[in-house]
Image (tube, rainbow, N blue to C red):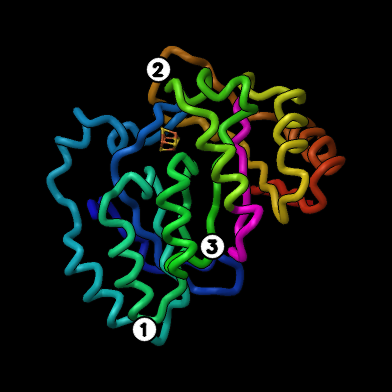
Amino acid sequence: MLISAIQKTTLLDYPWKVATIIFTTWCNLRCSYCHNSEFVLPEEIKLIKDFIPEKVFFNFLKTRVWILDWVVICWWEPTINKDLYDFCKNIKDLGFLVKIDTNWQNPEVLERLINDWLVDYLAMDVKNSFSKYALTTQVEEDIEKYKKSIELIKKSWIDYEFRTTLVNPLHTFEDIIEIAKALSWAKKYYLQNYKWGNTLVKDFNWKSFSKSKLKEFKKLSKDYIENVYVREYDE
Ligand code: SF4
């Protein structure tokens, strides 16, 4: 597993629980508003000199057995790492819970992890309505893979959340209604506002939404999904 960074302790990722977050590298998507080109684009990844060796990470974990509850494996896309299964197994063997942040493009990988109880929570990024997925991720993908992941989560025991980063003007009310309809059975749906940053595609002028627009997105989603939250300033 290529570990680019570790946030040793956070209480923010999982309420009331102490977590450590590890950041992987590589991503199969190219979202134009992505802030993380240095961990996504192969030509930039090559420039990284200091990956954190797994051994160092596991030695750190062993010193935190009584303090940490969760290990969060996140961006850029953990499921494309071939050794994710063994990596999760090693974490579970130490007694930690595992959360994975994913763009849910690899249903087979997720299924194996779920079936073997190697993941306890999935945070699934929904990039946009299906009709605008390729436009948003800049990759022509097989939408059936996403549908397969949705079915997998729907049928499984696992705890999860779906979430969408709202980018102005990439996301419209119609898009969010389409997503909310498709996920009407979901337990939790989070809406996150885009924050300006050093984006993958430089010549777009993406913006965040106003608070009133975010409220409107939430209201529209709640017509279909019971628990909808806005991250940043939930009311
Ligand atoms: S924002 Fe898109 S391109 Fe960037 S890490 Fe996430 S899924 Fe990959």
Q: Is residue 210 above or below residue 109?
A: above
Secondary element type, mark 1: loop
Contact? badges 1 and 3 (CB < 8 Å): no
**Which callout, 1 or 3, points at the residue further toward the start of the chain?**
1
Observer-nearest of 184 and 192: 184
Secondary element type, mark 2: loop
**Which callout, 2 or 3, points at the residue further toward the start of the chain?**
3
Q: CA distance from mark 2 to mark 3?
A: 33 Å
In the image, which is nearer the foreground, mark 2 or mark 3? Answer: 3
Residue hosting label 3: 121
**Who's the residue at 62% across and 37% down the image?**
193
The dot on residue 65 is 1
Q: Quadrant of residue 43?
A: top left
Residue hosting label 2: 202
Q: CA distance from mark 1 to mark 3?
A: 19 Å
Tag 2: residue type? Lys
Question: On the rendered structure, is 3 left or right of 30?
Answer: left
Q: Quadrant of residue 92?
A: bottom left
| 166 inside magenta stretch | yes
In the image, which is nearer the foreground, mark 1 or mark 3? Answer: 3
State the residue lying farthest toward the right. 223
Question: On the rendered structure, is 191 left or right of 198?
Answer: right
- Please give the range of residues in magenta: 153-167
In the image, which is nearer the foreground, mark 1 or mark 2? Answer: 1
Contact? badges 1 and 2 (CB < 8 Å): no
**Which callout, 1 or 2, points at the residue further toward the start of the chain?**
1
